[in-house]
Amino acid sequence: MPFRLEIVTAERIVLSDEVDQINVPGAAGRMGILPRHEPLLTSLIPGELDIIKNGERTPFAISGGFMEVLPEHVTILADTAERADEIDEARAEAARRRAEELMRERRSDQEMLLAEAQLRRAMVRLSVARLKRGGRRAGPGGGLE
Ligand code: ATP
């Protein structure tokens, strides 16, 4: 019995679908959400968001946001979200290099924090982009086989 999932950003509706399970990068650790989960409002950190539907896992990269869980409806409000096959790896690699360069320059605390955040986003995108070649299937309970 699936539940409805909406992933939205300020720019677009990224996904609106019936899914069986999601695994999200919660602020307090990775969380698996199944149908009829108890109501919950939590913040998300940059990381891999997995959607599991009919035994197929679709990975997304998100750069943080919020998630509202209701028994039959989950809404994810993400700062940015890209499906693995939408990620431009060369762009993420360039962003990673720029962030590392800025961190080496150590100009100010604020710039350091911005560079660290940019580095995290880029690293998540690179790691999620690599998953698209794997064609992994979700195992029992959504784990990897
Ligand atoms: P860049 O410097 O390359 O823009 P960034 O981390 O500063 O990287 P964000 O501010 O997180 O970029 O995202 C801006 C927009 O660009 C969002 O819509 C995001 O989904 C998209 N985006 C960023 N990087 C990529 C990428 N490597 N592949 C596809 N879309 C991306």
Image: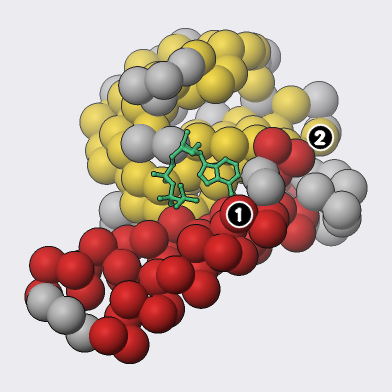
Query: Looking at the image, is mark 1 or mark 2 nearer the viewer?
Result: 1
Q: Of callouts 1 and 2, which one flags the residue occurring earlier in the amino acid sequence? A: 2
Which disc, if any, is residue 56?
Answer: 2
67 or 125, nearer to the observer: 125
Q: Residue at x 40, y 80 (%)?
A: 101
Residue 50 sits above or below residue 5 on the image: below
Which residue does the image show at 42% across and 78% down from the upper left?
Answer: 100
- Residue 16 is situated, as x and y percent measured from the top left of the image, at 57, 12
Mark 1 → mark 2, Cα distance in angstroms: 27 Å
Would you call the spot at circle 1 few (<14 residues within 10 Å), some (14-19), or many (20 or more)?
few
Q: Residue furthest left?
A: 109
Figure quadrant of residue 39: top left
With respect to residue 58, does 133 lie above or below? below
The answer to whether the residue bearing label 2 lies less than 8 angstroms from the nearest atom of ligand 1 is no
Residue 7: % across, % down = 48, 23
Kindly state the secondary structure of the residue where label 2 is placed: strand
The residue sitting at 30% across, 34% down in the picture is 66
